[in-house]
Image (tube, grey):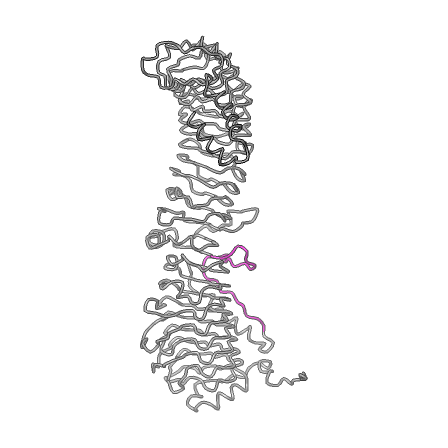
Amino acid sequence: MEDFLSKMKEEISHYSPYNPQSVVFEFIRSIWCKEWVSESWVSLSHDNDQSFQHPIEINPTITTLILRGCTDLSKFSLETLFTSLKNLRVLDLSYTSIELLPISFSEMTNLRFLSLKGCNKLRTLTLDSSSSSSSSPLGTLEHLEFLDLGGVSLDIIPKDVGLSKSKLRYLDLSCPTVTSLSSLFFKDISNLRELFFLGCTSLKSLPPSFANLFNLKTFSLSESQVMFLPIETFQHMLKLCDLSLINNHLLRALPELVGHACLKTFTLSGSPITQLSLHTCRSLETVYFYNLENLKELNLSATAIKEFPISISELHSLKRLHLLAVPQLRRISWHKLQHIPEVLNWDQCDIPEVLNLDQCELAGSRIHLTDSRLFSSFGDEALKKFVKEGGPLQSFHISISSCNKGDEIKSKNIGFTYLSHHKKSSCYNNIPLIASTFDHQFEQSPHINRHVEISSPERYPTGLEGIFKATESLSMCDDAFVSSLSDLNDEFPELKECKFRRCHHMDSIFKVNNTYQGNQLQIIWAFDLQKMTRVLDMKNYVSYFHRNEFSALKHVHLERCPELESIFPGNLMLSSLETLSILHCGNLRSIFYGHKVGNEDQFPRLHTMQLYDLPKLLHLCEKQSVPLQMKKWKKLHLRGCWNLHWLPFLVGARSEKVEVDGEMRQCKKLRAGMLEDQISCYDFKSPPPLASFREHVKNKIFLKY
């Protein structure tokens, strides 16, 4: 203690430079020394030698007596000793050989601290060991604040132990042989802060008065035979911070914990509980779950969890996990997880005030994050464990977006959903009807199990490289960071559909290299990409002679891309392309650019083309003389392509002509620019009456300069 006070004096010189050091130091010394250092403190703990032959000198001023670990108490006359120590405030008899409490215990009314921990020879707290109905000397200790009976072999705890204990703050009743407590045991100790029932293997129930512990902050119950806790237990314990329920193998249900305001730590293990909800426990930061073989559904929504609980990976029976409105969850160690539930509903943003879990998806995981870096540890091992080998992430919908976005970007269904953004044009009244029939091709896309959506991200979406290796559908909206999809990842081996909307930093969708060949990609959809100049950017396109990149591509839809100059390299073999739609791309000059391969069967499945409002479009491919078969080409819709002078030269036998639907003036220009043999392959249809009214509009408004 003297060493402590010398250090305290040094600390005072640092934190109290304006106070006289001697005055402050003497004040602290007067408090500590008067109460603890002088004759008030007596400690004979672990006195196992024989050097002590005489009882301690009785001094009424003693306030603290520590006999912890003294196995032989015959040297002490406890009855006489405790009678004289009426000022005693702290008494530690832990791990001693005491067998009965002397009657003088009842006279130590000033006692604040009493520890009988580990006194395994103490069988009763009453004055008579043969009677269980006698009163206990502990009943008169009204000022007691700390009582530890852990490890004491008591069959019955007398009723008056909890009588008039309004100042009691700490209580340890970890007695392995206690079966029950009196119904009003906790009635007078409502100010209790910490309560422990550890290793109570015989305890079968808790009294109804347990629910009256309004100020309880820590509660632990382990290895008991308790089946149910009082129904209103946790509704009244509004200050409870730490709750631990370990290896209570008969505990089948818990009282309502939803919305508990102060709960910070929760531990549950070895219980047959099937469902658990900690929803809206907004202070909950740490949870531990072990040996819960029957737990099938867990709800941790609207909590303050900061790290994904690793212990959940040991719950192999868990089918559904809800983590909604958890903005503080900033870390998940995918490489350490051994198991995740089949259904994972994880959303960092807010949720409605009333959450109906019955409306959640029954299959597949839905994850909505604001920070994509939470997937940084999702590597090849996690990909193999959770996706490839029949894992729970065989079906998922992952959304990366800001919680403050204005538009609703979440899709209600897992998979790719085509969203139509066509606006009715005053110039072409029949466009919406034709566009809707074309859009139907997108709605018939194959079922998608793994979808990633990036919308209004707050930063560059890093950390998704592992997820992209399993992604089948990708949607990006309102992104200001990504210049090309190839920048996100070199490989998209299972990507089938991609959709881009208002990604103004993107100059091309793919920068094709030797790694990614797009062999699975079937749909490309782009809307309002202000800087995009090409869909596929192949700078060294000559070296890709007779390559079959994007051989599975079926549908392409491009709309409102003002800087778009061209789309595909001329040597690309689009053997599966069925529909091509390009709308309102004012700078487009040609669809196919670069060296053209003289392969007649380059587009064997193309049947519909839709070209609207492309005033600079000169030709579909650069060379008119290149012959193409295009046996299934049936429809060509043209509006506003005033510089288009000729159509591709078609060869081979055809069952029917290509139906060309365009303005009357445009059709005449196309006829004049092609040979007669070439014209015979096309059937120019007269447009609806209102389709070409622009040609006859009289300008009645003049500008004055």
Task: Name the foreground residue: 457 vs 523.
Answer: 457
Front residue of 29/625: it is 29
Among the 4 quarters of the image, the one containing residue 686 = bottom right
Q: Position of residue 244 (x, y in %)?
A: 44, 33
Q: For residue 228: magenta?
A: no
- 410 in magenta: yes
Residues shaded magenta? 400-424
When the figure is inspected, residue 401 is found, relative to residue 533, above or below; the finding is: above
**Relative image position of residue 417 (x, y in whole percent):** 48, 62
Q: Nearer the viewer, residue 589 or 297?
A: 589
Q: Is residue 513 left or right of residue 499?
A: left
Relative to 34, is 629 on the left or the right? left
Residue 1 appears in the figure: no
In which quadrant will I find the C terminus? bottom right
Residue at x 38% of width, y 48% of height: 333
Residue 265, horizontal then vertical, whole percent: 46, 37
Residue 697, image x and y in percent? 63, 84
For the N terminus, which image quadrant?
top left
Q: Is residue 536 left or right of residue 86?
A: left
Image height of 127 relative to 169, above or below: above
